[in-house]
Image (cartoon, grey):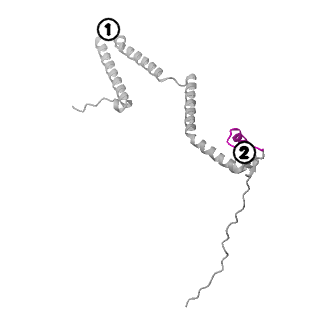
Amino acid sequence: MAETATIDRPSVARPVSRPRSRKPATVSASALALHLDCSRTYIGKLEAEGVLHCAPDGSGFDVDASRVAYLRFLRRERRQSARGEADIEFQRAKAELMRITIAEKKKALMPFYEVLAHQEELIGLFLTHLSGFAARCGGQDLVVRRAIDQAVYETRVKIAEAARKLADHYRKPEDREPEDDTL
């Protein structure tokens, strides 16, 4: 036959309910700053913005109400952060535009259309003088002039082919002409 023994355990005590005071606990701005982990001046700023409210009698801040108001303020700020990110992106773009403008003023940067205009002007000048090369160098000898003209023509064809290859390389795929594979 098995014997049973009782174990003496301390009884589980129920917490004694204490009567809560009807007056909320109020603390100074410095104590509230410690409670919310911020500075005293930040508490003053929050009070000026209407986030936190001092007791009407001037006795201090209600800790519970201030904590709830501060948490709501933080949530509201977080919801508005998308607008803040857009503002930051706008400021970055504005700063980049200012850097470009300054570089242009310092003549360290120039607009792309100006570069193209100067490039076309130089290429035109080069091709014009290249075309008159045979007359200047060959003189009255037509055999030499024809040989120079042929060399100039071949040079111009090679330049045109190189320019076309570069243009095809940098052109968008949808803008490219289909290649003819039939021979």
What is the crowding at mark 2: few (fewer than 14 residues within 10 Å), some, or many (at least 20)? some
Question: Rounded to the nearest whole Å, what is the CA distance between mark 2 and mark 1?
Answer: 95 Å
**Mark 2: amino acid:** Ser
14 above or below 21?
Answer: below
Q: Position of residue 165 (x, y in %)?
A: 35, 29
Residue that mark 2 sits on = 39
Determine whether the residue tagged by mark 2 lies in a helix, strand or loop: loop
In the picture as drawn, the residue positioned furthest to the left comes out as 183
At 68% from the left edge and 70% from the top edge, which residue is drawn? 13
Tell me where the magenta segment starts and ends, as one range.
41-57
Q: Residue furthest top?
A: 140
First-in-chain label (2 vs 1): 2
Residue 20 spot, x, y in % from top left: 72, 58
Residue 55 part of the magenta-drawn span: yes
Label annotation for residue 60: none
Q: Left or right: 59 with respect to 89?
A: right
Q: Which residue is mark 1?
A: 140
Q: Sort mark 1 into few (<14), some (14-19) or many (20+) by Cα contacts within 10 Å.
A: few
Residue in the picture at 24% in, 33% down: 181
User: Quarter of the image holding residue 179?
Assistant: top left
